[in-house]
Amino acid sequence: MEHVNVYTHSNLKGFKKGSGTVQYALTIKREGTIHVLDGYREVTNITENKSELIALIEALKRMNRPCVLCIHTESKYLVSCLENKWVDTWRVRNWVNAKGNIVANAKEWQELDRLLAKHRYSFEVRKKNVNKVFFSEEIRRKQHV
């Protein structure tokens, strides 16, 4: 299986809903050459947590075969839900949490769960804004092409 680095970023911060941009980049090394697939999406009226889910979903939609993924993210929320197996519990409970309520962002969690199922993956949690400059420059470049 190929090894792929997945980098995500959202410029939304906090629990209040807002509008902004989510970005991702996939790096794959083939025959000594690093190939990059990247993209961004404007989002409106959503929280930081949901935007981080969307960034990873958009990245995974670009993948057409099973890979070994190293997911680089700022989102402790995303990592906690997957590493602590909350997503597995939610799936078994039909996307209802321990309090009997529908899981926040259930639609996105279901899609992410489906997209991750064919891959092996691990996480690298980054400090906030590590790739902010890179992603900001890439968006500006693409908007002016």
Image: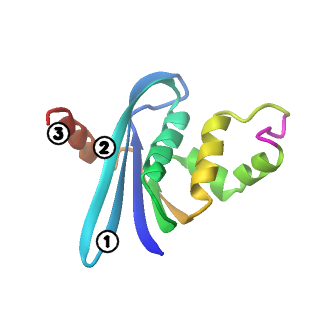
Structural crowding at the residue carrying mark 3, measured as other residues with C-alpha within 10 Å and reported as few (<14), some (14–19) or many (≥20) = few
Q: Mark 3 points at which residue?
A: 141
- For the point 52% across and 26% down, the residue is 46
Q: Distance between the residues labelled 1 and 2?
A: 23 Å
Q: Which of 6 and 115 is in front in this view?
A: 115
Say whether residue 4 is left or right of residue 114: left
Q: Name the residue under label 2.
A: 132
Which residue occupies the extreme left position in the image?
A: 145
Above or below, comparing residue 69 to residue 42 in the picture = below
- x and y percent of residue 67 in the render? 49, 68
Q: Distance between the residues labelled 3 and 1?
A: 24 Å
- For the point 55% across and 37% down, the residue is 49
Q: How far apart are marks 2 and 3 (CA)?
A: 14 Å
The stretch drawn in magenta includes residue 97: yes
User: Callout 1, which amino acid?
Assistant: Lys
Above or below, comparing residue 94 to residue 26 in the picture = above
